[in-house]
Image: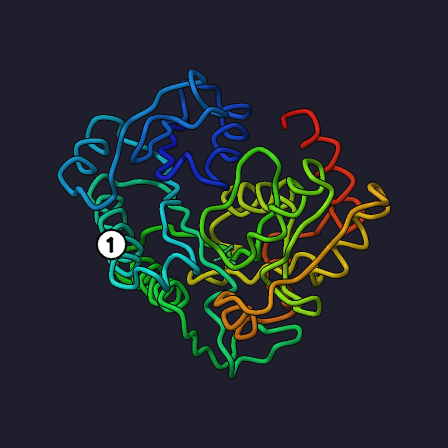
Amino acid sequence: MSEKILIIGANGQIGTELVKALRNIHGAEAVIASDIKSPAYAIRNSGPYEIANVLDRDNLHHIFEKHRPTQVYLLAAILSAVGEQKPKVAWDLNMTGLLSVLDFAVEFKVAKVFWPSSIAVFGPHSPQHDTPQYCVMDPNTVYGFSKLAGERWCEYYFEKYGLDVRSIRYPGLIGWRANPGGGTTDYAVHIFHEALKTGKYESFLSAGTALPMMYMDDAIRATITLMDAPADTLSIRSSYNLGGISFNPEQLADEIKKHIPNFEMSYVDSDPRQAIADSWPKSIDDSYAQKDWGWQLEFDLAKMTADMLVNLKTII
Ligand code: AKB
């Protein structure tokens, strides 16, 4: 069957990479990118594009009707730090957008839907080390509990309507093609830009704040592997834990210094994102992803840092 893939939120950090990867696999015409604004530079003129606001239900319905997608990736979301500044807007966008897409996916018989969850679904009472798939979850950010509620809705649509929804709890993502927008893990991307541009960086998280992170190449490979997995191998229809690499700002700075010896790192005295980071896991157990769809990480801290610097240098 030839695929028709709709990516909603294509201009974001994951979207720009995913559009590129899926167009390489399926051909440009098979992948319809869409976002609220005109296309990001990285995906401009590379294939079909629709302006879509996930809160405009009529327009979204029209796009489903026009393209009849076989797969939909819903990536539009407000992340953790911005979500705390605009809690109601974040809840509305993250939930209403998801429910509309799930409804239209059922109505238009979409074969598979992907929706990203996050390590933000865990909270201060979740185990912080090797956080398991199933445990206490008490997220205290709007982003976190919108993701947790979204996971429950995904599983519900799978159980009640047979919709083939698949999801990953992404760690903080690090890539060179696109910037993250408003998250708590954003420091781990900004640090590379500043290291190359100015040779110094002031981190908004403290030196010892370890978080699970992942290089974008691994994240895109994980997403496509999960979407290609036979449906009957998947035991989780809420969202899969994905571990990635666990490191803190000081360890990342030390790794960057191996390439840029004069790089200087400093730390702000206080930042609201610190409390969010403190409520999240430090490392994640992803054994279900390994067992169900053969997940294996490729990029460790050293490999990621080297690759990130080489590639970022070519575009800044
Ligand atoms: C954020 O920091 O909000 C995101 C995430 C971990 O989901 N990068």
Foreground residue among 201 and 56: 201
Foreground residue among 79 and 116: 79
Scheme of colours in the image: rainbow
Image-based side of 108 in relation to 273, left or right: left
Q: Position of residue 57 (x, y in %)?
A: 16, 43
Mark 1 element type: helix
Q: Quadrant of the N terminus?
A: top left
Q: At x 29% / y 58%, what residue is drawn? A: 157
Is residue 271 placed above or below 126 in the rendered structure? above
Q: Say which quarter of the image contains residue 31.
A: top left
Image-based side of 220 in relation to 37, left or right: right
Q: At x 48% / y 65%, what residue is drawn? A: 120
Q: At x 61% / y 46%, what residue is drawn? A: 189
Disc 1 target residue: 99
Is residue 151 placed above or below 264 in the rendered structure? below
Q: Position of residue 102 (x, y in %)?
A: 27, 50
Is residue 197 placed above or below 231 in the rendered structure? above
Q: Total label count?
A: 1
The amino acid pointed to by label 1 is Leu
Foreground residue among 95 and 205: 205
User: Outermost residue toward the top?
Assistant: 45
Q: Position of residue 97 (x, y in %)?
A: 26, 50
Image-based side of 154 in relation to 313, left or right: left
Q: At x 49% / y 76%, what residue is drawn? A: 123
Label 1: how many Cα within 10 Å (few below 14, some 14–19, many 20+): some
Q: Quadrant of the C terminus?
A: top right
Label 1 CB less than 8 angstroms from ligand 1: no
Q: Position of residue 71 (x, y in %)?
A: 38, 37
Image-based side of 207 in relation to 98, left or right: right
Is residue 60 placed above or below 231 in the rendered structure? above
